[in-house]
Image (cartoon, helix red, strand yellow):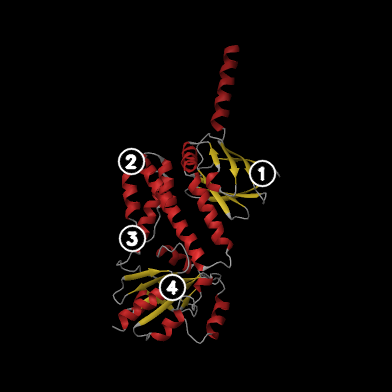
Amino acid sequence: MIKRGVIVLCTLFCLLSCGKKTVFQLEGNLSNLKDQTIYAVFEGPDKRFVDTIKCEKNGRFHLNREQLNFSSVTLLFEHKSRWITLYPESGEKVSLSGDIQIPELLEIKGGDINDKLTAFYKGQSSLIKERALLQQKLNAGSDSLVTDETTTTSKLINVNHQLQERAESYIRKNPSEAASVVLIYRFFRNNEDTRLLDEFLALLEPSLKDFFLVKELESFTARAKRTAIGAEAPGFDLKNIYNQPVSLDSFANKYLLLSFTAPWCEMCQTDNLYLDDIKREFPKDKVDMLLISLDTDQTQVRKIVNADTIKWNLVTDSAGQATTMLELYNVTALPRCFLIDNEGKIILKTDNGLEVKKLLEQIIKK
């Protein structure tokens, strides 16, 4: 009887243990935190959800959540102006401490990736602090001479270059570490030239091929090659704000300026991008233009366009068209302009409309 009871208890214990859910535990102790609300963005292969964390006044917080197959957790601080990404591992409690004003130097403990990234950034602390000061100086602005701003920008570029060099050294020495993949993702995603990124991906150990960031980087480099200079421009089928069909074939035998804009982006305005000048200067039978705008209010956009002296061929995001085009043309920042030649090849991509204007002047008026 006793023996049977022991067997029953053991069976119940096993069933309870097997049914126990893995819990992600996060605790923090942050200094210089002005806003006590933190947003935690959990991301996995097929889902994304957000938790809101309320800190105690001393910057302490705790979070327990069922670990449902998520790959990363991004914490957003100070009204979402600062952030840090964590990489949870099953059964590992993660702790976060330090000065929130320089998120990269926060000490993150718990899990192999977090530990190794913390050690890497700690080794670059002097450069990271210098970069933070330079960025703060640029963001503050002043009435100082333009040469001062140029000097600060030059110093910032140099610091970023040094950090890239140190990240590259780490990656080459540690091709079997997932932390190396994170550094590739943070430092070497370049829309213009993927050669170094391709080299790093080839360098990684085969054991990392299923790591989610490796797959994201492979997808990124494929998209970047799709819109490289000299590549055939990706085709599309859209409808403009007048419900007229627009495709790449609509501009056959012409140069097409494809410009990605948004109403809230100051540098995206047509005059800042020299689009007004280009529209007036070049005949439509030689140079045409299509604007892709991240604006959902098509009726309001149509009113604004109708009031303009220039008739713009414009596609908005009312049906998700602009979002689809952002993905198709691998646009990660606005503004963005692509100049496509009369044979359908990309010959320029830039955020500077003056570059487009000068190149067209060389081509059309030669």
Q: Do residues under tags 2 and 3 come within 8 Å of each other at their CB atoms?
A: no
Q: Name the amino acid type tagged 4.
A: Ser
Q: Position of residue 343 (x, y in %)?
A: 28, 75
Relative to 50, is 309 on the left or the right? left
Mark closer to the observer (1, 4): 1
Residue 115 seen in the figure: yes
Which mark, residue 59? 1
Identify the mark nearer the N-term, 4 or 2.
2
Q: CA distance from mark 3 to mark 4?
A: 19 Å
Identify the mark nearer the N-term, 2 or 3.
2
Mark closer to the observer (1, 2): 1
Given the current orientation, which residue lies at the most extreme right position?
57
Q: Residues within 10 Å of mark 4 (few under 14, many from 20)?
A: many
Residue named by callout 2: 206
Q: CA distance from mark 4 to mark 2?
A: 40 Å
Identify the mark nearer the N-term, 1 or 4.
1
Q: Secondary structure at mark 4?
A: strand
